[in-house]
């Protein structure tokens, strides 16, 4: 629209009645959402823009495609945009991304989110795990001070798999064997008293020292005090790496014990377990292979750490760059 025509149209806006104003806003909403997403992508990409193929930071503008500025690398001569090489590359309907991320902040199940944003449920499912692919890695670098660690177990699920490794069972079924077995997924959660949290899908069955070395050791400040239950794996892990360790015997009814500097307990991490279980219940079963994504999603929401769709999009894009 040319400038004089736009000025004339804009001057008539106050004369619109309420239904007409609502209709105008509804028509402008997708375009406004797309412009906002494109502006955010460009702003985030400008912080550290580089070629996704060779990591060269020397480039020049090379036209536009699908609403995004493209660039050409001066080193390898490949063209790219700010989403190239990321889980968000080639995703369509960008005008609906912020609305969908808002539905994720509300922890909407796939079908409810799809209905709210007016996309197919398969699209909603694909978007969920594309956005969470990088969000799950947005974790604290270290846990320090008093660090509580404990594991929780969930029945292994092959939901959505084309071929099962075991006999099928009904949703909400039970393990065939009592106690901790290879039929259960082991989720390790460690949390310090400031609320910083890491978690990991450690494997199946009982927790081992090797799993603690893989998932906890790189994130644990060597001056930290590790507090756990009476699981022998924590004791062996602490002795092997010279980490201060205290244990509470939950089976003997011990919940809290006074230490030299602070209370010895695992109530914070157990409370996190409870919140995680209650939150996962709304999805009516989560496949084991997707559990790491859901753990990252829950950490993003815990304590109101992520409060806006724009913030969630920034995390999804920002951590992609090498």
Image (cartoon, rainbow, N blue to C red):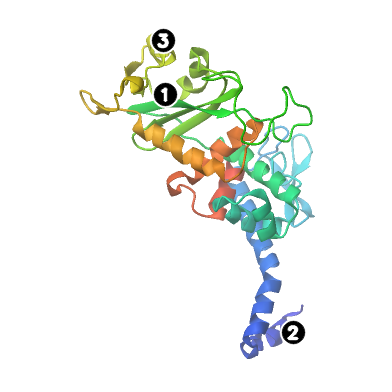
The N terminus sits in image quarter: bottom right
Neighbor class of circle 2 (other Cα within 10 Å; few <14, some 14-19, many 20+) is: few
Residue 299 visible to the viewer:
no
Which of the marked residues, 1 or 3, is nearer the chain's N terminus? 1
Query: Which is in the foreground here, disc 1 or disc 2?
Result: 1
- Residue with the mark numbered 2: 5
Q: Secondary structure at mark 1?
A: loop
Q: Secondary structure at mark 3?
A: helix
Distance from disc 1 to disc 3, alpha carbons, whole Å, reads 16 Å
Distance from disc 3 to disc 2, alpha carbons, whole Å, reads 77 Å
- Residue with the mark numbered 1: 220
Name the residue: 38% across, 23% down: 221
Find the residue positioned furthest to the bottom: 15
Displayed quadrant of residue 166: top right
Instruction: Check residue 236 in the rendering and tell me which mark sits there, or answer none.
Output: 3
Which of the marked residues, 3 or 2, is nearer the chain's N terminus? 2
């Amino acid at each position: 629209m040319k400038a004089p025509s736009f000025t004339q149209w804009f001057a008539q806006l106050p004369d619109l009645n309420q239904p007409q104003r609502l209709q105008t806003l509804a028509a402008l909403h997708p375009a406004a959402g797309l412009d906002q997403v494109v502006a955010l992508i460009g702003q985030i990409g400008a912080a550290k823009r580089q070629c996704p193929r060779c990591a060269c930071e020397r480039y020049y503008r090379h036209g536009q495609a699908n609403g995004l500025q493209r660039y050409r690398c001066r080193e390898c001569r490949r063209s790219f945009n700010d989403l190239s090489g990321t889980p968000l590359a080639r995703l369509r309907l960008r005008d609906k991304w912020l609305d969908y991320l808002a539905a994720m902040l509300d922890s909407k199940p796939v079908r409810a989110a799809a209905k709210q944003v007016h996309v197919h449920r398969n699209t909603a499912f694909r978007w969920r795990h594309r956005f969470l692919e990088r969000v799950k890695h947005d974790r604290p670098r270290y846990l320090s001070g008093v660090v509580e660690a404990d594991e929780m177990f969930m029945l292994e699920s092959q939901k959505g798999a084309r071929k099962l490794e075991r006999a099928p069972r009904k949703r909400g079924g039970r393990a065939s064997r009592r106690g901790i077995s290879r039929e259960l997924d082991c989720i390790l959660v460690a949390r310090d008293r400031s609320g910083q949290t890491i978690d990991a899908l450690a494997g199946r069955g009982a927790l081992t020292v090797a799993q603690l070395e893989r998932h906890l050791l790189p994130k644990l400040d060597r001056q930290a005090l590790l507090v756990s239950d009476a699981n022998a794996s924590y004791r062996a892990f602490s002795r092997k790496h010279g980490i201060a360790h205290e244990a509470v015997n939950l089976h003997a009814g011990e919940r809290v014990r006074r230490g030299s500097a602070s209370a010895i307990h695992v109530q914070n991490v157990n409370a996190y377990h409870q919140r995680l279980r209650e939150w996962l219940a709304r999805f009516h079963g989560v496949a084991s292979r997707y559990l790491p994504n859901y753990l990252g999603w829950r950490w993003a929401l815990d304590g109101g750490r992520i409060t806006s769709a724009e913030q969630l999009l920034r995390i999804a894009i920002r951590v992609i760059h090498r």
